[in-house]
Image: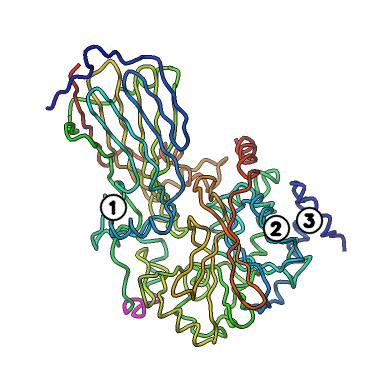
Amino acid sequence: MFHTPLKRPGSQPSAAPLVVEKPPLRSIEIHGWKITTCKRPILNSEEIQRAEAELELPMPEMIFGHNALTVEHAASGFQLAFNALDALRCVDKSKEAATRVQVAYADDWSKAHGTEAEDLQSIKPYDWTYSTDYRGTVTSEAFKFAPSTTHRIDYERLKQREPIHFFDQVVLFEDELADNGTAMLDVKVAMMPSGFFILQRFFMRVDGVLLRMHETRIYHAFDEATILREYTVREDRYAVVAAKIPQWKDPSALTDADWVSTVLPPPLEGEVEVITMMM
Amino acid sequence: MGLDLDRCISTLLERNLLAESVIRELCAKTKEVLMNESNVVHVKAPVTVVGDIHGQFHDLLEIFRIGGRCPDTNYLFLGDYVDRGYFSVETISLLTCLKLRYPERVQLVRGNHETRAVTQTYGFYTECMRKYNSSAEVWKCFTDMFDYLILSVVIDDSIFCVHGGLSPSIQNIDQIKVIDRFREVPHEGPMADLVWSDPDPDKEDFVVSPRGAGYYFGSAVVQKFLHMNSMSHILRAHQLCMEGYTVLFNEQLSTVWSAPNYCYRCGNKASILEVSPSLERFFNVFDAAPDEDRELFTAVVQAH
């Protein structure tokens, strides 16, 4: 494990939050930890072309390629960023991935089109649901998240009432899957006096077929030496989730990631990773 | 004749809703007008073409400010009037009134969002329930009317206009005319393709979408279609772009997008396409109306 001193002698990071609003940037700094969000318009045609050529992947309908959430700790050099293009680099481009999920009426459709459709060249394969296992980009080489079986995020502590100095949500990409559902990646951050919490969420709904949620949680308490990262994958069949919609809600409940999150079953896979810093 | 259309229009322009009974009558009468229109309506230039609006009512008002008032300017709307934005009811109410008031000067093409299935998920249904006392009646009136919207327009025999794009089942315009369009948009077949398909600048032919349903169409398809029908240009909406418009395939196809700052967060520009009497095309580009953002807050507060 790589250890880095958290504090440099002589410089005492301030416990008073410093919030800077400088559109399109917003940032907060506390205890030497700086979190910045950047929210800009979607990519233009030229930028999309460049990104598609580089990633060999059609871009989602709404691609916020300039948006980002970054965490920096100047004293140690630690840097973590969440951005759309790095997330899309993790999308599976294998042939199998392209057909793993099909829209509800794909069966009828291919029956009706049969050989005609087979004769047509198909588009270069990729997972059109944009499912990504992206967990953020650690831009400082000195730090690497290592799997851990002993650590876990202390949710009890997170639940304690504390003022929130800073909250923000950044959308990284969104696609309506040609009105067959949604694929959306966003990241939220909350900075408290005792630490910060980040939730990045990939939410996918294919109408009539499947709901899926990949969540990455980052937690650091200022009085602890660890940065924890928890990654979970949850999914369920559309019909099962739809049956859980309470009577007072309408079908648009299925577009609400927060609600869906409350009714999905426990994770298929979950993983905790940790970076330990020397105090 | 109890329906005073001019009064309905001013009510909407003053940001008020029409009563449920008025909407019922409005939709019934508009259905009668639409029923007599062909699947392919022929219009003459000059005409101003509008792409997706998606319930951004204040941006629609901005369109009338920059493009000219109805009926001084002829308008062709390419569909996707509802869902996503917070003012779908106001938007479709106003467009329906204008269609009924000036049937020759306003054309409403069907988009993929003008269906029962899609509007139940993407906001229009929920908005109707919220604005009309938890009654689905208004949603039902409008979605029943959607079944009568036309599928395409041809400007001066030379510009083909549609919401989505071309279909492998359609080589000739006459094949559109024989579609039985008075129904919910099906998942497959020519009617679905017209409202769903997208161009792919890197392809020549039709390609199947990786989703397992639907098509992309390439340059050779566009060329062949234009040649077969002795036309010069295809004009469609359906795809968001940062610049508000896109021109592809050697200027043979344009996409026009008319919802600025889409979903109140994309930061994109929008445009309307003004087709002159000599068929020159001019994209009139505009940004989000200040009202749209300001009133969004009120809408969100009311929603919760």
For the question of whether residue B208 can be seen, the reply is yes
Secondary structure beneath dot 2 equals helix
Circle number at residue A91: 1
Residue type, mark 2 in image: Phe
Which label sits in the foreground, 1 or 2? 2
| C-alpha separation, residue under disc 1 versus residue under disc 3 | 49 Å
Callout 2: residue from which chain?
Answer: B
Circle number at residue A226: none
Callout 1: residue from which chain?
Answer: A
| Image position of A115 with respect to A103: above or below | below
User: Residue drawn 58% across and 58% down?
Assistant: B285
For the question of whether residue B115 can be seen, the reply is no
The part of the chain drawn in magenta is A111-119
Q: Residues within 10 Å of mark 3 (few under 14, many from 20)?
A: many
Give the x, y percent position of residue B65. Answer: 70, 55
Q: Which residue is mark 3?
A: B9
Give the x, y percent position of residue B8. Answer: 80, 55
Which label sits in the foreground, 3 or 2? 2
Q: Nearer the viewer, residue A53 or B146?
A: A53
In the picture, measured across the screen, residue A151 lies left or right of residue B90, that is left
In the picture, measured across the screen, residue B12 lies left or right of residue B191, that is right
Residue type, mark 3 in image: Ile
Q: Nearer the viewer, residue B286 or B100?
A: B286
Q: Which residue is mark 2?
A: B64
User: Of all residues shown, which one is farthest toward the left?
Assistant: A1
